[in-house]
Image (cartoon, helix red, strand yellow):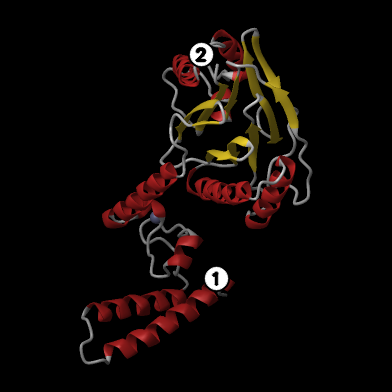
């Protein structure tokens, strides 16, 4: 019995065979075409024998999405040839370069606010999202975390990036912007995929409003300490029609907002203990007077000391937004 995918692939292979036959009969046919025809015939034979989609090395199933992309595949991901491995690595490094270019410029300033961020994928690409924009109403800052890691999460990250870049231009109130973004995200993700996100707008007079879609608390850092701000709503992508309350606060000159992903709070030390939000607060309060870059490097230093000898397993992003003194 063939599966629906296999029926589709058989039709696909039969069509390719037809085309190859036609191409081979043209006067200047390339010799490589007859090799392809042999490969297509072999795939069709495997289908008849029931060995199609089985790795020739380990006899496990080949990943279905790879077969759909190329029905001639004969090996699973674990048993790629050297050339295939190199091609995959170069695809991934290109994806990483593209993702880097989606990030804002370091040392961004707008409307009397200085910003610094640190973006550190656990692998080649990250599911974390960070963006900064200057709008008519001040600085727009966004920080998010797509569920999962790796390539799939990074694709959703770039989707979020594009969605909010275009929504930002519409000049909507924050809650409406996030509601729209949520609906677009809902329609384009699979069940079980979601993203936590903070979208904030900081005006020249120190007034900040922000929406949190299930993200970790934003820290307001001032000379007397650091306070977590704003109850969080539900993440993006969970419910198509949800409202997102807007939080408002006023920052004095020299105050900072500190945002981070769970790569910070859930980092573990060698005994398995989590870094935790309490440590973030204590550190933030200790560096209340620091510039954004200073705060971030203090945080990274402490995190490095804490997690000494333990491999970073989650994407990490830090963002500090400070009202110029
Ligand atoms: Zn295999």
Q: Quadrant of residue 141?
A: top right
Indicate the quadrant of ligand 1 in the picture: bottom left
Residue at coordinates 34% horizontally, 49% vertically from top-left? 89
Q: Is residue 217 visible?
A: no
Q: Which residue is mark 2?
A: 290
Q: Is residue 172 visible?
A: yes
Residue at coordinates 44% horizontally, 29% vertically from top-left? 107
Residue 251 percent across, percent down from the top left: 66, 20
Residue 137, compared with residue 276, is above or below; it is below
Residue at coordinates 47% horizontally, 78% vertically from top-left? 12
How packed is label 2: few (under 14 Cα within 10 Å), some, or many (20 or more)?
Answer: some
Q: Quadrant of residue 220?
A: top right
Residue 110, compared with residue 48, is above or below; it is above
Camera-side mark, 1 or 2 = 2
Q: Quadrant of the N terminus?
A: bottom right
In space, the residues marked 1 and 2 are separated at their CA atoms by 57 Å
Query: Nearest the camera: 6 or 320?
Result: 320
Query: Nearest the camera: 137 or 35?
Result: 137
Residue 133 percent across, percent down from the top left: 55, 39
Pick whichever of labels 1 and 2 is earlier in the sequence: 1
Residue at coordinates 79% horizontally, 43% vertically from top-left? 243
Q: Is residue 35 left or right of residue 9?
A: left
Q: Quadrant of the C terminus?
A: top right
Tag shown at residue 162: none
Q: Which residue is mark 1?
A: 5
Residue 4 percent across, percent down from the top left: 58, 73
């Amino acid at each position: 019995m063939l599966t629906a995918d296999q029926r589709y692939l058989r039709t696909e292979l039969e069509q390719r065979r037809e085309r190859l036959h036609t191409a081979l009969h043209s006067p200047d046919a390339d010799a490589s075409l007859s090799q392809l025809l042999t490969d297509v015939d072999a795939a069709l034979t495997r289908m008849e024998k029931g060995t199609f989609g089985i790795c020739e090395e380990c006899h496990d199933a080949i990943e279905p999405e790879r077969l759909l992309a190329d029905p001639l595949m004969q090996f699973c991901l674990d048993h790629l040839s050297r050339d295939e491995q190199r091609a995959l690595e170069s695809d991934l490094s290109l994806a990483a370069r593209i993702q880097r270019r989606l990030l804002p410029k370091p040392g961004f300033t707008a409307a009397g606010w200085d910003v610094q961020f640190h973006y550190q994928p656990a692998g080649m690409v990250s599911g974390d999202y960070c963006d900064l924009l200057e709008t008519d109403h001040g600085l727009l800052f966004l920080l998010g975390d797509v569920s999962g890691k790796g390539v799939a999460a990074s694709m959703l990250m770039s989707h979020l990036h594009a969605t909010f870049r275009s929504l930002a231009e519409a000049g909507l109130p924050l809650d409406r912007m996030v509601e729209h973004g949520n609906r677009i995200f809902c329609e384009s993700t699979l069940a079980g995929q979601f993203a936590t996100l903070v979208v904030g707008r900081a005006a020249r007079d120190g007034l900040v409003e922000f929406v949190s879609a299930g993200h970790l608390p934003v820290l307001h850092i001032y000379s007397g300490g650091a306070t977590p701000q704003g109850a969080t709503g539900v993440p993006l992508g969970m419910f198509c029609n949800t409202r997102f309350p807007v939080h408002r606060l006023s920052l004095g000159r020299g105050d900072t907002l500190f945002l981070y992903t769970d790569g910070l709070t859930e980092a573990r030390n060698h005994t398995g203990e989590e870094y935790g939000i309490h440590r973030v607060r204590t550190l933030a309060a200790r560096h209340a007077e620091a510039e954004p870059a200073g705060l971030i490097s203090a945080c990274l230093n402490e995190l490095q000391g804490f997690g000494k000898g333990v491999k970073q397993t989650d994407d990490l992003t830090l963002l500090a937004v400070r009202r110029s003194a």
